[in-house]
Image: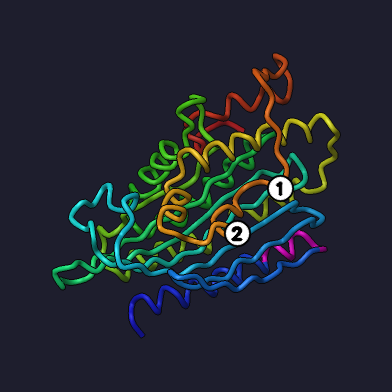
Amino acid sequence: MSSSEKVIAFLRTLQQHICTELEQADGSATFIVDEWQSTLGTGVTRVLKDGAVFEQAGVNFSHVKGDTMPASATAHRPELAGAAFEAMGVSLVIHPKNPYVPTSHANVRCFFAYPKDGSEPVWWFGGGFDLTPFYPFIGDVQHWHEVASLLCEPFGDDVYAEHKQWCDDYFFLKHRNETRGVGGLFFDDLNQWDFHTCFKYIQAVGLGFTDAYIPIVNKRKNTAYGERERQFQLYRRGRYVEFNLVWDRGTHFGLHSGGRTESILMSMPPLVRFEYQYQPEAGSPEAKLNDYLRPRDWLNEKV
């Protein structure tokens, strides 16, 4: 089995694992399965809609190839301009119904580039997971980061700190001067270790997502809420839309490479609202979120 085949086999298993865990947490809805094929490759998009817990959850697997790397993928690797490529990954975004359950995103991916001069393929991995609460709880945020820290430990003492910082920097809305949420892990162009070690790391990240997220879902999914919380949730979802369309490299790569638009934009929330110059009332639960939208050393915060 080739290296790319091993990665694909894991990604397919990971997609099924995450969908099963989410279905169990929801308790009422199941994922529809949409197998697709395009000029670039194949994939499976799984979407859960109108569940008891999840308003919409999408978990996408894709495997695409192309004769020429898109410009968005070679911005940091100009020597690969014009190279053929192969990309595979699992990406997901979860939009819960209850405003007290955070929105979450995760992905793991692998790229192979095949230089025009016939030299050895160039490979790298990327991925991570991040959490976007609307009504945050410090205990939930610490649990999220504890899982992230523990899964990083076997790969080096500095990995968590480096990939947490990368996440804080990447998921930052420059035009709003705020982070998208409370961070997690993010990494790209990962190839400083041998292939086997890098592959083991994305396996740990992919499988660690449900360890980090599902306990928070189960803890908050039955919290009572009203129209005020719902409206605030819809307003804050607007930030998610802004980031994905303006800043996200994965969205840009998918659209610029001719990927399947419906699967790429499954990350969009089903309902969202925008309000001109909205400001939460000082001292309100909604205003509390502002203190979370900046990088912090979550593991050492006092509960």
* Vertical arrangement, residue 238 with respect to residue 175, above or below: below
* Vertical arrangement, residue 100 with respect to residue 116, above or below: above
Tell me what residue is drawn at x 60 percent, y 24 percent: 290
Amino acid found under the numbered disc labelled 1? Pro
Q: Are marks 2 and 1 in contact (CB under 8 Å)?
A: no
Amino acid found under the numbered disc labelled 2? Thr
Q: Residues within 10 Å of mark 1 (few under 14, many from 20)?
A: some
Is residue 80 toward the left or the right of residue 285 in the image? left
Is residue 23 toward the left or the right of residue 105 in the image? right
Tell me what residue is drawn at x 75 percent, y 45 percent: 220
Residue 23 position within the rendered picture, expressed as x and y whole percent measured from the top left:
73, 65
Residue 84 position within the rendered picture, expressed as x and y whole percent measured from the top left:
28, 67
- For this orientation, the residue located farthest to the bottom is 1
Task: Give the alpha-carbon distance from disc 2 to disc 1, as whole Å.
Answer: 22 Å
Task: Indicate which label's residue lies in the foreground, 2 or 1.
Answer: 1
Tell me what residue is drawn at x 57 percent, y 72 percent: 36
Task: Check disc 1 and report the residue beneath it.
Answer: 270
Task: Check disc 2 and report the residue beneath it.
Answer: 210
Residue 135 position within the rendered picture, expressed as x and y whole percent measured from the top left:
70, 34
Q: Residues within 10 Å of mark 2 (few under 14, many from 20)?
A: some
Is residue 30 toward the left or the right of residue 292 in the image? right
- For this orientation, the residue located farthest to the top is 282
Is residue 167 toward the left or the right of residue 76 in the image? right
State whether the magenta stretch is mostly helix, strand or loop: helix
**Helix, strand or loop at mark 2:** helix
Q: Which residues are magenta?
A: 21-28
Residue 109 position within the rendered picture, expressed as x and y whole percent measured from the top left:
42, 62
Residue 25 shown in magenta: yes
Between residues 205 and 89, which one lies in front from this camera angle? Answer: 89
Figure quadrant of residue 19: bottom right
**Quadrant placement of the N terminus:** bottom left
